[in-house]
Amino acid sequence: MGKAKTSKRGGASSTPYERPAKNAAANNVFKFSKDFGQHILKNPGIAETIVAKAYLKPTDTVLEVGPGTGNLTVKILEQAKKVIAVEMDPRMAAETTKRVQGKPEQKRLEVLLGDVIKTTLPSFDVGRNNFRPPPQVDSSVVRIEPKLGSERPNISFEEWDGMLRVCFNRRNKTLRASWLGNKEVLAMLERNYRLWCATNDIPVDDTVADEEEDDNEEMEVDENVPPSAGDEEEEWGGIMDVDGEDDDTPSFFKESMKAEIPKTKSKRKKTRVALLVKEKVRKVLEDVTELADKRSGKCDENDFLRLLAAFNAEGIHFS
Ligand SMILES: C[S@@+](CC[C@H](N)C(=O)[O-])C[C@H]1O[C@@H](n2cnc3c(N)ncnc32)[C@H](O)[C@@H]1O
């Protein structure tokens, strides 16, 4: 029987590392697994900034998911009372543990080995059993802070708020359905547009559109966009509430609708200004921003900023 080969590096079972080193992270002594997303933050300045942005208090207990070699962990420990770090790779877990071994911080670090998805975590989140009756989902506490100074977009926040209320009336609807498929929304936009025209000495065409113009307009509103993968389907019925009863209408629209809007003779007939507003909305959603088929829940801040700019450019305002 041949002699078993012995590793010059001390054998695979005695250490996960390929060669001894004082600082495994710095020397990259074991192979990082891209499957586990093991990209280690090597810039201490960034690590410090990340931790600074968390505005940790000395009384905080922090849950860190995937500490890797512990670069963030040691920074967090400088600011917080305790860190509970969940790491699925034993080599990484060992590395993180080693960072504080024999130091005062050791007592304040708990490393849990395992997949965070399958690990029973200490209760950081607000579990459903804290509510009565228990909801279907757990909650998390998030910190939302207003942007200040140059980070703050130069927009009217009243307008921003007004526009987002429409978008998030039903966040799983497409923007087309939220804007063009809700008669109360369109009426509110028409009212605002009339006000804007009056303020800017722009005449509005209050004549009644003929059947043909009106019908063409209705056809353009039609949509049949199935939800994309991952979308919640609960809202999707495949049908738009073009002219039907709309239970989604927020009360503030209903209230604003009490204001006078010139009525047309027939229920079906619309004024040309109403059609113009509808066409402007269609243009903003489909041609300018190309966001018509996107759902609000999937849009980001930049999408909404583009949307507001495009509406305003068409003379459509929300305050
Ligand atoms: C991108 S590294 C981040 C390392 C460290 N936070 C840093 O900034 O240097 C991601 C770490 O998460 C770990 N990881 C990936 N999926 C995990 C999971 N489901 N549960 C626990 N740890 C996980 C990986 O092993 C890896 O160490």
Image (cartoon, rainbow, N blue to C red):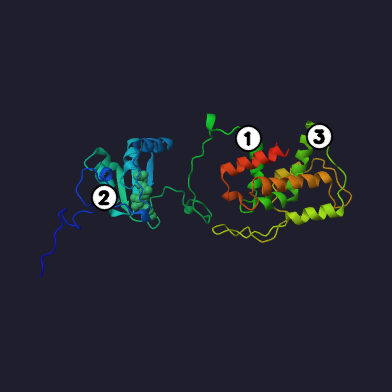
Respond yes or no on whether mark 3 lies under 8 Å from ligand 1: no
Q: Quadrant of the C terminus?
A: top right
* Label 2 secondary element: helix
Residue type at mark 2 is: Ala
Q: Which residue is mark 2?
A: 94
Q: Which residue is mark 1?
A: 157
Q: Is residue 245 visible?
A: no
Question: Closest to the observer: 314 or 71?
Answer: 314
Camera-side mark, 2 or 3: 3
Instruction: Looking at this view, name the residue that lies furthest to the top.
Output: 149
State the image coordinates of residue 137 (x, y, percent, origin top left).
Answer: 51, 55
Residue type at mark 1 is: Phe
Residue type at mark 3 is: Ile
State the image coordinates of residue 150 (x, y, percent, origin top left).
Answer: 53, 30
Q: Which residue is mark 3?
A: 202
Query: For residue 315, what is the image quadrant?
Result: top right
Asked if the residues shown at circle 2 and circle 3 are in contact, with their CB atoms under 8 angstroms apart, the answer is no
Gap in angstroms between the C-alphas marked 2 and 3: 71 Å
State the image coordinates of residue 49 (x, y, percent, origin top left).
Answer: 40, 35
Respond yes or no on whether mark 2 lies under 8 Å from ligand 1: no
